[in-house]
Image (spheres, rainbow, N blue to C red):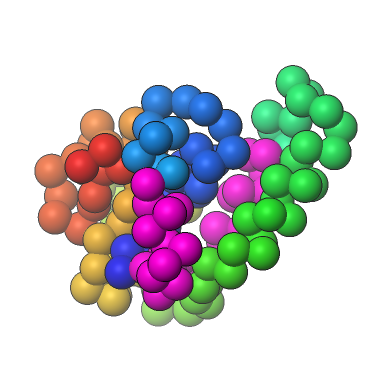
Amino acid sequence: MVVLDASVVLRWFVEQPGHEAATRWLRRFIVEPDLFVAPDLLRFEVFGALCRLNPRRDPSWATRSFDRFVRLGVRTLPTTHELFDRAAELSRTLEVAGYDAVYLAHAEALSIEWLTADAKVLRRLGRDARVRALGR
């Protein structure tokens, strides 16, 4: 099981570096439905990113893509006050964005890796045992 990052999900819908690796993870998820877990904010991040990409596509592309994502049934977990506290500490000490720290706090709480394709995060935390790069 891994904590799934929005940067991986987006590669299921948009061809960009890491698209092939993301697709392999998606295929694995289809046969292992407990493979992914994510903070509740995953849906918001995916929706926001799909809408941002939408101007270059047909007007209903973002909503259709988001509906397909939701139907996959990735299990999301609530971000509790304690996890927000830990995320704030991680954000401050590791100098990562608050959203990124929430993913990391969930991974840490579950003692599993956070799967991400976010280049900025990987530059900063690529050697952190809690973080797994998409291509690895």
Left or right, residue 112 beside residue 56: left
- Say if 56 sits above or below 118 in the image: above
Residue 100 visible in the displayed image: no
From the top left corner, tell me how far across and down residue 61 is, in percent: 78, 37
Left or right, residue 92 beside residue 84: left
Residues drawn in magenta: 24-50
Q: Residue at x 61, y 48 (%)?
A: 46
From the top left corner, tell me how far across and down residue 81 is, in percent: 47, 78
From the top left corner, tell me how far across and down residue 11 is, in percent: 50, 38
Q: Residue at x 42, y 62 (%)?
A: 29
Count of numbered circles on the image: 0
Q: In this orientation, which residue lies closer to the viewer: 72 or 9?
A: 72
Q: Single out the residue that lies furthest toward the right.
A: 59
Is residue 72 inside the magenta stretch? no
Q: Residue at x 20, y 42 (%)?
A: 136
Q: In this orientation, which residue lies closer to the viewer: 89 or 127?
A: 127
From the top left corner, tell me how far across and down residue 134 is, in percent: 31, 42
Q: Quadrant of the N terminus?
A: bottom left
Q: Single out the residue that lies furthest toward the top.
A: 56
Residue 45 visible in the displayed image: yes
Q: Quadrant of residue 105?
A: bottom left
- Say if 30 sits above or below 76 in the image: above
Q: Residue at x 51, y 73 (%)?
A: 75
Q: Quadrant of residue 118?
A: top left
Q: In this orientation, which residue lies closer to the viewer: 40 or 63?
A: 63
Is residue 41 inside the magenta stretch? yes
**Overall secondary structure of the magenta section:** helix
